[in-house]
Amino acid sequence: MAFSGDQPPPHIAIIPSAGMGHLTPSCRLATTLATQGCHVSFVVIHPMVSNAESNSMTTFLSSFPSIHPIHVNVAPLTGSGDPFFLQFEAIRQSPHLILPLLNSSSPPITSFIVDIALASTFLPAITPTGISTYIFFTSSASMLAFFSYFPIHKVNKTAAATVGDVEVPGVSLVPMASVPMALHDPEELFTIQVLENARALVQANGVLINTFEALEPKALMALNDGVVVPGFPPVIAVGLLKQLSLKEKMGFPWLDEQPERSVLYVSFGSRTAMSVEYMRELGVGLVKSGAKFLWVIKMKKVDKEEEQVDLEQVLGEEMVERIKERGSMVVHGWVEQEEILKHGAVGGFLSHCGWNSVMEAALHGVPVLAWPRHGDQRVNAELVRRSGLGIWMEEWSWGGEGKVVKGEEIAERVKELMESPAVRSSVARMAAEAVKAVGEGRSSEKNLVEFIAKLKG
Ligand code: UDP
Ligand code: UDP
């Protein structure tokens, strides 16, 4: 989209929160808007929680010099909670530091896009200025419906009552077992943030979301028709957001040597560690499945705390030997996930179902074996199953709780994933829908063009 000379392009300021699950889609949104001719400023918050965030921001800014960075230092919060939630809170408490830097921008900011985790402190600070403000929701529309309705669900309950099943009007029933674990405790920082952010959403001019209509038609319609929350702002599906074309790319030469669709990629995302006991049993399952695999292991939630890992000590000498015999790979560290998922040798993805991972698998037509671990991931896994993007064994443990899933069981499911023609064809159908959604004049592209036209006023 081009902007005519007499009409200056919109100047959009993007304020992301913390963690790769939030930062990556915010960067993708920034480049999408810049490609459409918008002037984009991007708030870069220091210090960052993980090395993955610092590295990705450095590469992002050097790859896209047209995106204008605004660096801000916030005071980190210390405490015993989840370091990413503490960082959400540190940023939530910083509109007074961040907004003045943006308000002095030239040309002036014409719209803000603020990450969902920051909604309740930034919306009231920006709304009086009259500058339009959109919230960027970084998970599924099903999850947006759940979060938005959650405060209403809570009001109908006594303080002492359990969370219970959550019947999201017009969408679906989220069973208590799929409610993010932190939300079971009303005192948890995450619960307080989620409730405040959800209540603040009505102040936004709209909510942008990285999904597409063919994947979540019911949730998007219920949100937009005010069935979930009366008076809810427009929800604008702009997914799938495209991968960043970065200057430097880490390839994965080992994959080039593997036959087409033969490799299972195994990863639980950027912030989910697994205990040694679970990992050993998972190793048994992977080896038993007979598939070749590329397994990314993670032992600490925050990568800065990861130490050099001796695989033989973690997995046992025999297991390491068997993995080698199979010609499979175990990696401890960061990989370029989307480069892997788009590689023709990859035929399946054992995933925790972080939303970005689900979207990346959908785009590249890789069937998912869902093993959600925490947060929004069970709701996302249900969507994976329902939409035909993959399979989900609902009874498998989550959040480090429950019994260790046996290797035999894992092996059976991996075989099903890699070999089932039904799974493969339903995934291919959804991938085609994903590609279509971003085509010219199609649902997400149309939503994006209309959104930008509105910003131009
Ligand atoms: N990711 C990656 N390499 C890794 C781990 C994660 O590139 O080793 C990327 C992944 O492709 C996705 C993001 O980091 O874009 C993680 O977001 P997601 O929502 O999938 O899960 P989270 O890490 O937030 O739990
Ligand atoms: N989220 C939300 N309100 C908040 C904070 C998070 O709705 O105040 C949503 C957000 O969309 C995210 C999901 O909750 O995808 C899970 O949060 P978390 O940061 O744990 O995501 P992860 O890092 O696991 O992707």
Image: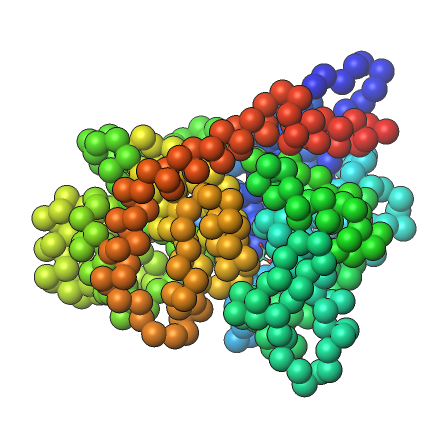
- From the top left corner, tell me how far across and down residue 61 is, in percent: 54, 35
Quadrant of the rendering where the N terminus is positioned: top right
Residue farthest along the bottom direction in this orientation? 160
Query: Quadrant location of residue 38?
Result: top right
Ligand 2 falls in quadrant: bottom right
Residue at left offset 43%, top offset 38%: 427
Q: How many marks?
A: 0
Q: Nearer the viewer, residue 108 or 366?
A: 366
Residue at left offset 49%, top offset 64%: 374
- From the top left corner, tell me how far across and down residue 143 is, in percent: 62, 55
Quadrant of the rendering where the C terminus is positioned: top right
- The image shows residue 367, relative to residue 447, as above or below, that is below
Residue at left offset 76%, top offset 28%: 450
Residue 80 appears in view: yes
Residue farthest along the top direction in this orientation? 5
351 to the left or right of 314: right
176 to the left or right of 91: left
- From the top left corner, tell me how far across and down residue 391 is, in percent: 40, 51
Residue at left offset 33%, top offset 32%: 343
199 to the left or right of 433: right
Residue 43 appears in view: no
Q: Nearer the viewer, residue 424 or 370?
A: 424
